[in-house]
Every structure is written in structure tokens, then in C-alpha cells.
Amino acid sequence: MREQLEARLLDLRGEFATGQAAMAEIGRKQEELRAMLLRIGGAIQVLEELLGQTAAHTQPQDQP
């Protein structure tokens, strides 16, 4: 009986370590995704501002 319990404990510790490694990998991927979204968001903002400036320069001026 004791040997079965020790074997089960060993299995559970292995599963626990595997789960911790998976959580660490998910956290790393989450940080990479967050950084990528920040870069994309910044690029979107720059392009929107440039398009807004271009649109302002190309619109006809009101004549009095």
C-alpha cells in the first residue's frame, strides 16, 4: 500500500511540475502578445494621424 501511495505522489509531483512549466510558457506568450499589440496599436495611431493630416491638407478651403 505504501509503495502505491509513493508512486502516486511521484506521479502527481511530475504532473504538477508539468503544469507549472505550461503556466510559465503561457505567461511568456501572453507578454509577447501584449508587446505585439502595443506595437500594432502605436503603428495604427501613427497612420491614423498621418491620414488625418493628409485629409486636412487635401480638403478644399472655404472661400468667402
Image (cartoon, rainbow, N blue to C red):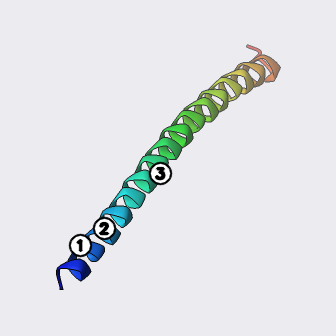
Q: Earlier in the sequence, mark 3 or mark 1?
A: 1
> In the figure, 3 relative to 41: above or below?
below
The mark lying in front, picked from 3 and 1, is: 1
Q: How far apart are marks 2 and 3 (CA)?
A: 25 Å
| 1 sits to left or right of 53 | left
Which residue is identified by label 2? 10
Q: Position of residue 34 (x, y in %)?
A: 51, 39
- Decide which of 19, 36 is in the foreground and name it: 19
Q: Which amino acid does label 3 sit on?
A: Ile
Report which quarter residue 15 is drawn in: bottom left
Which residue is identified by label 3? 26
Which residue is identified by label 1? 6
> The residue tagged with tag 3: helix, strand or loop?
helix
> In the figure, 40 relative to 2: above or below?
above
> The residue tagged with tag 1: helix, strand or loop?
helix
| Quadrant of the image containing the C terminus | top right
Q: Distance between the residues labelled 3 and 1?
A: 30 Å
The mark lying in front, picked from 2 and 3, is: 2
